[in-house]
Amino acid sequence: MSTDSLGRFSVKFIGNTAQEGGHTSYEIKVTNPDGQCWNVSKRYSEMRQLHDELRLRHGDSLPAFPGKRFWGNNDPAFIAARQVNLEQYLQGVLLMEREGRTPALSAFLGGPAQTGERNQARQYQQILDGMQAKLLNLALPPAPLDETETAQRLKKYGDGMRISVLSQPVDPVILRDLGLDSEPVRLCPSNSEHFEALKAPYAGADDRKLLTDALDGVQQVLKPAKPIADPDKLIVAFPHIALPSDSGS
């Protein structure tokens, strides 16, 4: 894809290659404003990472990024459709950043080998762009999180809280109280070791004898055969106090 009359970066997807592990690598032809062309090979995850970094700068003004699919990623029809959508996405990004100066975008697009003063000027500009990108732009509203990223962050937070709670000898019901997630409540390590033994029925004497012995013990405590202390010694006579009326009489 050639550059337009105003001069800008442009991209064209020229093919794709299946990689080990079931991943697909997309071959992209990049053309800079000077008309120089080169090819780069990128995976879907790399383009998603670029999108996340560009959101910090552009927020919701970015084009919609093609969604992720959890199965059927190797289907040729799906790969062809995703390639078209990814190319449209990058073209939309380059309409916003005609010179590709954002460090993340510049690193993604790459470039031909450059030497001399031109290379030094480009490196200098990359340093300036990198410093500018690190500055916090308070004028932009915070970028909203999509459902997938929100779910991932909640899961990460929940896992961290569970690790913290389960490392302490406390009642694991605290997980439900905190409302971390809907997973079944697990036992902390110190209790789980004895849980099966506590669930098993008592293998000793008959239950009736155990209950009788327990009641007898309670009766002995409540009504001992021998008093614990002499009742007479527990009562102290109140001392006599001489009143003025006693002395007058």
Image (tube, rainbow, N blue to C red):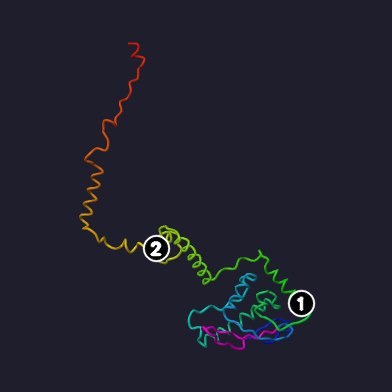
Q: What stretch is highlighted in magenta?
A: 13-31
Q: Tell me if label 1 and label 2 are in contact, CB under 8 Å.
A: no
Please provide percent x and percent y for residue 16: 58, 87
Residue with the mark numbered 1: 120
> For this rendering, which residue is in front, 144 or 13?
13
Residue with the mark numbered 2: 187
Residue at image point 22% right, 51% down? 213
Q: Quadrant of residue 29?
A: bottom right
- Main SS of residues in magenta: strand
Compared to residue 30, the image places residue 233 above or below, namely above
- Quadrant location of the N terminus in the rendered image: bottom right
Report the side of 63 relative to 164 (left or right): right
Please provide percent x and percent y for residue 226: 23, 39
Report the side of 22 relative to 3 (left or right): left
**Amino acid carrying mark 2 in the image:** Leu
Please provide percent x and percent y for residue 25: 58, 84
* Label 2: element kind: loop
Compared to residue 226, the image places residue 99 above or below, namely below
Residue at the limit of the structure toward the right, as seen here:
117
Q: Is residue 17 magenta?
A: yes
Choose the circle earlier in sequence order: 1 or 2.
Answer: 1
Residue at image point 42% right, 67% down? 183
- Quadrant location of the C terminus in the rendered image: top left
* Real-space CA distance between mark 1 and mark 2, rounded to the nearest whole angstrom: 61 Å
> For this rendering, which residue is in front, 61 or 48?
48
Q: In which quarter of the image is residue 202?
A: bottom left
**Amino acid carrying mark 1 in the image:** Gln
Report the side of 234 relative to 88 (left or right): left
* Label 1: element kind: helix
Number of residues whose C-alpha sits closer than 10 Å to that of mark 2, classed few (under 14), some (14–19) or many (20 or more) = some
